[in-house]
């Protein structure tokens, strides 16, 4: 049954511009529709947030962040965002429409893929993520559902809704880990942190799934899958696909290392490793059909999926500008040689003898120079080949390791890749080399290495034990940076008053300055709120007078949106927060709530009622009650009340009732 017929948006004109044609997919945050931009007359995709979530500011903020993040990227393998807006309760993104299928559709219908097809899909994914990583962003939710394969073979990465800048807080908030459990990196599960290496881990899991047709970790509940991510390595795919080349095993194992420190730093680095792995495989290895692959027959569209994969292999993939990946196909060159026949050595003219003998002599005369020429050519070729072989064996196949000591990782990798060398990275502590810079290489700089060899680069993790710096009086932003430079982690921050330290600067650290700690230790900061100032009592003051008095004391003033009933005059201050006698720092805010004056309430008629009933009626109406008894022989019946029944009096005021006398 076509469920789009029940969707109220289908057939509607959203925001006066986008004609909604059909529903494509539904997710946890939004529904995606195919639509037509009536202004530009083009088909696009509309991602519309569920109306029930539009009232939640955090969901709206995340939704809009997706538009801003992806709009910053300009890459052929990233789904583009054209527009963002709202129409009543609908918050939407207008995005590029990709006609085709998702990688999940392909895996569901085809099972395991041939290595060539898996790499043809992986490489544009890494190119897209590499562009995002070099722009300072992390996707955080890479999975086959977010990989679109167009009918033209173009592979695109979608759904940057969980993207977050690398340099901002990259931990999940409110204790919720964002992402899909099967593709979460261990550090995302353990402490909610995620950087570019979390995307690398997810791509490694996706490659495993493409090569084997199944996920590396399974279980009856999400908790079981999360436990395996934390405590079990992703197995080599050859365990399920016998005969799979070790280069692909190494690629998966390196990308899915549980320790993020030993993973490739970002998608650009993993892309270079994937290209190198492909180059090391033969056509037979690339086109081997895994036993888990499903036949091309099956549900409608299965043949189309196969053709889509084949077209993906023919698409020219775009790399990030900073990716230093060498295409081996560019190393070939054509050469043309031309041999001149030498003149005859016997000094004869161009005239030859006639007759039979002359014909034989002419043939022999013609063959002789050819033999000599052939002999000379063969001799020259033999000498050239011998010389070339000696040169290649002794010199030609080698290159010299360039100097990269004390370079940053990115600069060292560019230098080594530029020399045609592959790079592996490991890390070690160093008290002399700055954190993140090269300590040493293996082989060492200046040594000879095969031109296709690998250089292992050792990067500094900083000293094994570091001292907590003295940050007293340092602005908090600078203090955080100094801690990171020292190899420490900025921890929790608390605020305290200080007469000596300026507002926003560090008063002290925990551990104290000079304490010895291991790199990565969290250091808590106590930040100054400035000098403590007592909040004056302005309740009952006129609005302008109260605001002026508070500003003279150095406070900011904020007025509550709605006034309240109170005993104070209308327009005067009814209450303040914090109250009188509270303590704030200079520049802090005091909130004032203005009075609407007393609330007038109609007085009920209690004359002739028993005193208890009268008190109950007046109290229920919001009044205080005072009972007045006659001197002689009072009864328990109300004879009169201080405010006539039906009149109004301020709520909370006192109504006096007088009891009757028996006289």
Image (cartoon, rainbow, N blue to C red):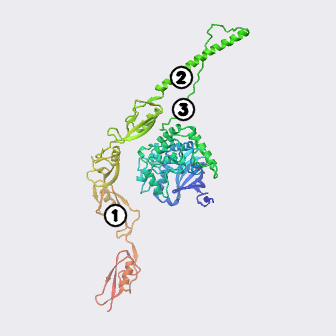
Q: Mark 3, residues whose alpha carbon is within 10 Å: few (<14), some, or many (≥20)?
A: few
Counting from the top left corner in percent of width and height, residue 205 is at: 49, 48
**Which residue lies under the disc numbered 1?**
576
Mark 3 and 2 residues: CB-CB less than 8 Å, in contact? no
Q: Mark 2, residues whose alpha carbon is within 10 Å: few (<14), some, or many (≥20)?
A: few
SS at badge 3 = helix
The N terminus - image quarter: bottom right
- Quadrant in the rendering for residue 407: top left
Residue 438 located left or right of residue 130: left
Disc 3 or 2, which lies upstream in sequence? 3
Q: CA distance from mark 2 to mark 1?
A: 95 Å
State the residue at coordinates (37%, 74%). 651
**186 vs 560, nearest the viewer:** 186
Q: CA distance from mark 3 to mark 2?
A: 24 Å
State the residue at coordinates (49%, 56%). 219
Against 329, residue 484 (above or below) is below
**Which residue lies under the disc numbered 2?**
385
Instruction: Give the number of marks.
Output: 3
Q: Which mark is residue 302?
A: none
Farthest-out residue, right: 355
Against 230, residue 643 (above or below) is below
Q: CA distance from mark 1 to mark 3?
A: 75 Å
Farthest-out residue, bottom: 663
**Which residue lies under the disc numbered 3?**
330
Counting from the top left corner in percent of width and height, residue 538 is at: 31, 63
Counting from the top left corner in percent of width and height, residue 272 is at: 49, 39
Farthest-out residue, left: 500
């Amino acid at each position: 049954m076509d469920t789009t017929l029940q969707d109220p948006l289908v057939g509607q004109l959203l925001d006066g511009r986008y004609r909604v044609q059909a529903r494509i997919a539904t997710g946890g945050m939004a529904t995606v529709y195919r639509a037509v931009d009536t202004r530009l007359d083009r088909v696009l995709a509309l991602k519309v947030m569920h109306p029930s979530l539009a009232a939640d500011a955090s969901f709206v903020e995340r939704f809009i962040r997706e538009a801003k993040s992806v709009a910053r990227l300009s890459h052929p393998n990233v789904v583009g965002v054209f527009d963002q807006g709202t129409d009543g309760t609908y918050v939407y993104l207008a995005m590029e429409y990709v006609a085709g299928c998702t990688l999940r559709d392909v895996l569901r219908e085809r099972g395991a893929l041939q290595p060539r097809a898996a790499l043809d899909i992986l490489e544009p994914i890494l190119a897209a993520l590499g562009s995002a990583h070099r722009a300072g962003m992390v996707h955080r939710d890479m999975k086959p559902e977010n990989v679109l394969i167009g009918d033209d073979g173009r592979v695109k990465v979608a759904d940057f809704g969980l993207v977050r800048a690398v340099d901002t807080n990259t931990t999940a908030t409110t204790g919720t880990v964002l992402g899909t459990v099967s593709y979460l990196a261990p550090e995302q599960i353990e402490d909610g942190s995620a950087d570019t290496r979390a995307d690398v881990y997810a791509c490694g899991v996706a490659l495993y799934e493409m090569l084997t047709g199944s996920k590396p970790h399974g279980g009856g509940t999400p908790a079981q899958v999360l436990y395996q991510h934390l405590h079990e390595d992703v197995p080599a795919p050859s365990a399920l696909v016998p005969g799979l080349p070790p280069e692909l095993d190494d690629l998966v194992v390196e990308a899915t290392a549980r320790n993020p420190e030993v993973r490739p730093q970002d998608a650009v680095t993993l892309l270079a490793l994937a290209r190198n792995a492909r180059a090391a495989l033969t056509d037979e290895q690339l086109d081997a059909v895994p036993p888990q692959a499903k036949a091309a027959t099956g549900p409608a569209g299965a043949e189309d999926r196969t053709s889509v994969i084949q077209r993906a292999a023919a698409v020219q993939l775009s790399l990030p500008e900073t990716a230093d990946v060498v295409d081996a196909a560019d190393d070939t060159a054509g050469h043309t040689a031309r041999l001149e026949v030498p003149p005859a050595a016997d000094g004869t003219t161009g005239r030859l003898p006639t007759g039979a003998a002359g014909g034989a002599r002419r043939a022999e005369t013609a063959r002789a120079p050819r033999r000599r020429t052939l002999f000379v050519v063969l001799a020259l070729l033999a000498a050239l080949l011998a010389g070339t072989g000696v040169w290649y064996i002794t010199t030609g196949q080698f290159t010299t390791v360039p100097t990269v000591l004390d370079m940053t990782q990115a600069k060292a990798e560019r230098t080594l890749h530029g020399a045609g060398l592959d790079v592996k990275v490991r890390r070690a502590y160093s008290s002399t080399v700055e954190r993140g810079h090269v300590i040493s290489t293996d082989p060492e700089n200046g040594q000879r290495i095969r031109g296709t060899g690998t250089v292992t680069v050792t990067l500094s993790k900083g000293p094994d034990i570091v001292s907590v710096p003295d940050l007293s009086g340092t602005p908090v932003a600078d203090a955080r940076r100094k801690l990171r430079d020292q190899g420490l982690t900025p921890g929790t921050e608390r605020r305290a008053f200080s007469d000596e330290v300026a507002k926003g600067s560090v008063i002290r650290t925990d551990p104290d300055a000079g304490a010895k700690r291991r790199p990565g230790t969290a250091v808590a900061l106590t930040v100054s709120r400035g000098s403590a100032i007592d909040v004056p009592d302005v309740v009952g003051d006129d609005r302008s007078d109260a605001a002026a008095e508070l500003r003279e004391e150095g406070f900011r003033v904020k007025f509550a949106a709605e006034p309240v009933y109170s005993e104070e005059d209308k327009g005067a201050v009814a209450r303040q927060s914090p109250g009188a006698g509270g303590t704030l720092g200079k520049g802090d805010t005091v909130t004032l709530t203005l009075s609407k004056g007393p609330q007038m309430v109609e007085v009920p008629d209690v004359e002739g009622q028993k005193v208890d009933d009268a008190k109950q009626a007046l109290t229920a109406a919001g009044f205080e009650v005072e009972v007045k008894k006659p001197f002689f022989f009072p009864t328990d019946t109300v004879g009169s009340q201080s405010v006539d029944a039906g009149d109004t009096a301020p709520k909370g005021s006192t109504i006096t009732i007088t009891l009757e006398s028996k006289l």
